[in-house]
Structure formats: C-alpha cells, structure tokens
Amino acid sequence: MSTANLIKMANQIAQYFASEPDQQQAVLDVRNHMKMYWTPGMRMELLAWQTEHQGADLHPLVQSAVSGAGWEA
C-alpha cells in the first residue's frame, strides 16, 4: 500500500475520533483502531514516514498516536 493511502486512511480515522472531548482518549482510540485493523507493516511504514517527515500532513491525533508509547508492532 502506498504511503499516501496510509496517510489518507490515518487522517480519516483521526477525523472520526476528533469529536471525542478527552484528547488523550481520542489519541488512544486512534492508536487502538490502527493496532486492531492495520497490519504491523502498515504501522511501521507510517511510523517511518512520520519520523522522516516530522508528521507533515498527518492529523495531530495521528501524530500523537504514532509517536506515543504502545505503537510498536
């Protein structure tokens, strides 16, 4: 899968959870969703891209979810 598609999907997931009033819970929800439904390879590709590009183009919830503890494959 292309990185552009991963970014698009990650941002869509974040948009869904953005209405959660508790920001920490929203980050956990994004992370948990991606851990449940994304393959480890998809998660690692997104992490590598975020590390290289400092999260440009990623929703803030995705940036926090990917960079936080518990993201490892």
Image (cartoon, rainbow, N blue to C red):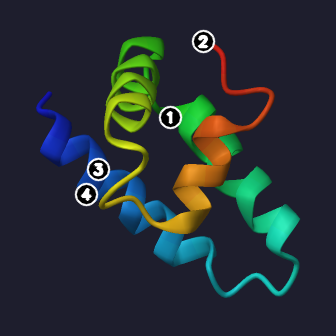
> Of callouts 4 and 1, which one flags the residue occurring earlier in the amino acid sequence?
4
Nearer the viewer's eye, disc 3 or disc 1? 3
Question: Looking at the picture, how far across and down is residue 14, in whole percent?
Answer: 52, 66
Q: Which residue lies at the image location 59% right of the left edge and 39% below the top edge?
A: 66
Question: Looking at the picture, how far across and down is residue 58, in whole percent?
Answer: 39, 59
Q: Would residue 34 be found to the left or right of residue 44 on screen? A: right
Identify the image quadrant of residue 45: top left
Label 3 – label 1 distance at C-alpha:
15 Å
Q: Are marks 3 and 1 in contact (CB under 8 Å)?
A: no
Q: Are marks 3 and 4 in contact (CB under 8 Å)?
A: yes
Q: Secondary structure at mark 3?
A: helix
> Of callouts 3 and 1, which one flags the residue occurring earlier in the amino acid sequence?
3
Q: Amino acid at mark 1?
A: Tyr
Q: Which residue lies at the image location 34% right of the left edge and 30% below the top edge?
A: 52
Q: Which quarter shows the C terminus?
A: top right
Q: Amino acid at mark 2?
A: Ala
Residue indicated by mark 3: 7
Label 1 – label 2 distance at C-alpha:
12 Å
Q: Which residue lies at the image location 32% right of the left edge and 40% below the top edge?
A: 53
Q: Secondary structure at mark 2?
A: loop
Residue indicated by mark 4: 8
Q: Are marks 4 and 1 in contact (CB under 8 Å)?
A: no
Q: Are marks 2 and 3 in contact (CB under 8 Å)?
A: no
Label 2 – label 3 distance at C-alpha:
18 Å
Question: Looking at the picture, how far across and down is residue 44, in whole percent?
Answer: 43, 18
Residue indicated by mark 1: 37
Numbered circle sitting on residue 73: 2
Q: Which quarter shows the N terminus?
A: top left
> Of callouts 4 and 2, which one flags the residue occurring earlier in the amino acid sequence?
4
> Of callouts 2 and 3, which one flags the residue occurring earlier in the amino acid sequence?
3
Q: Would residue 4 be found to the left or right of residue 62 on screen? A: left
